[in-house]
Image (tube, coloured by chain):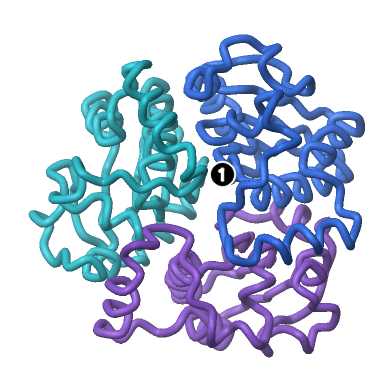
Chain colours: A cyan, B purple, C blue
């Protein structure tokens, strides 16, 4: 049976989202079943209008230019592309936490990027976390 | 038997503490047994004099006004209230890491918010982590 | 049999690396087997030339002076010393993610601090995470 990963995405910053995307690509390559729960700051990043323009970093902010230049030089896919590709490869579901969405003015699923699957309450996250083989809070 | 969550709270920032509080409320609603270990920057936030005044964010600092305004508009409880309510609902223990406390000048349990249960060494965290069904590092 | 910890080190900041070091020292004291995977911003911190000079914090940046003064006053070892000591005590392996290394111009193992064991792809991290008793994303 496929191993299960439960990924809480608290972050709204491109550095952490890129790391999450790389981890996700690895999990997808190993056919894990992945449930992603988008929490507080994450909902900002998943809002439709922010996906392409968001340049926030959670760390090493004074290295921002070097970081983004390296991503480009190495042709690293944008974070959202990792998520999109993983969804095509394996069983990945992206759940937006309802409260988190509202913090950033997102009330409906259409307010978020098209690969978001549904809007849920925190209870679903807890249940998924309890069942997962690998839990990550990012 | 109740499932166990072990939550390492590294963060001293209100955005992450609020997310931790929401997760905690979900865990409490599902009757999990939760052990919280307050590490480095977390001990700053749990110090008595900082609980009400702390306005640090770990991420999206330029959205600070929007973030706090949304919390207020949506009547989201303050992070410490989530922790307080979870303790009333289920078996939640809050342990302050002794070294972390000292970093911020907190030597005694009374230096921290009243819902802190004890001051411990890192060994207790490792033991709790080994036994937990869900481990989160926040 | 020794319990296994899998630690993803995303962070490149001294506050989080110090917390990771303290956790690691606890895990080593309990003879856990630890696999560390150094991801994105972490690879910056593990580069040879940055280990001693890095003063970045991920949180509470306005408390930087107090934080570093407390570390000194309490004679807390530098983060890298925690890692070094843990490697001497127990089975700890430090793996640099190849992509992360390249982001910061590190192509070869010699570009990183001498306690790094190898450069790996994300697949190895996923496999280790699946097998671990305790997963932490720091």
Position of residue B128 measured from the top left corner of the image (x, y, whole percent): 73, 58
Is disc 1 surrounded by few (<14), some (14 to 19) or many (20+) residues within 10 Å? many
**Residue that lies at the very extreme toward the left in this rendered image:** A110
Q: Nearer the viewer, residue B21 or B15?
A: B15
Describe residue A37's horizontal placement relative to residue C94 as left or right. left
Q: Residue at x 73, y 21 (%)?
A: C116
Residue A2: give x, y in percent of width and height: 41, 30
Image quadrant holding the N terminus of chain A, namely top left
Q: Position of residue B132 (x, y in %)?
A: 64, 55
Whether B65 is drawn above or below C87: the answer is below
**Residue B52, above or below A31:** below
- Can residue B6 be seen from the camera position used here? no
Q: Is residue A46 left or right of residue C47?
A: left
A14 or B77: nearer the viewer: A14
Tell me if residue C84 comes above or below residue B5 in the rendering. above
Corner quadrant of residue B84: bottom right
- Specify whether residue A94 is in view: yes
User: Residue A82, image x and y in percent?
Assistant: 30, 29
Labels in figure, total = 1
Placement of A65 over or under B113, stated as above or below: above
Residue at 41%, 29% (x, y): give it: A22
In the foreground, A31 or A77: A77
Query: Residue C59 sits in which quadrant?
Result: bottom right
Residue at figure coordinates x 65%, y 44% from the top left: C134
Q: Secondary structure at mark 1?
A: strand
Q: Residue at x 61, y 47 (%)?
A: C56
Q: Chain of mark 1?
A: C
Q: Which residue is mark 1?
A: C137
Q: Nearer the viewer, residue B5 or A103?
A: A103
């Amino acid at each position: 049976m496929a191993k299960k990963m439960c990924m809480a995405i608290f972050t709204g910053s491109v550095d952490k989202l890129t790391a999450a995307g790389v981890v996700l690509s690895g999990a997808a390559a190993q056919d894990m079943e992945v449930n992603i729960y988008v929490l507080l700051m994450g909902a900002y990043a998943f809002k439709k209008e922010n996906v392409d323009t968001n340049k926030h970093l959670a760390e090493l902010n004074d290295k921002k230019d070097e970081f983004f230049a390296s991503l480009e030089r190495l042709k690293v896919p944008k974070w959202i592309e990792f998520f999109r590709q993983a969804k095509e490869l394996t069983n990945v579901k992206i759940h937006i936490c309802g409260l988190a969405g509202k913090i950033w003015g997102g009330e409906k699923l259409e307010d978020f990027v098209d690969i978001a699957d549904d809007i849920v309450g925190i209870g679903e996250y807890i249940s998924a976390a309890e069942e997962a083989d690998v839990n990550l809070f990012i």
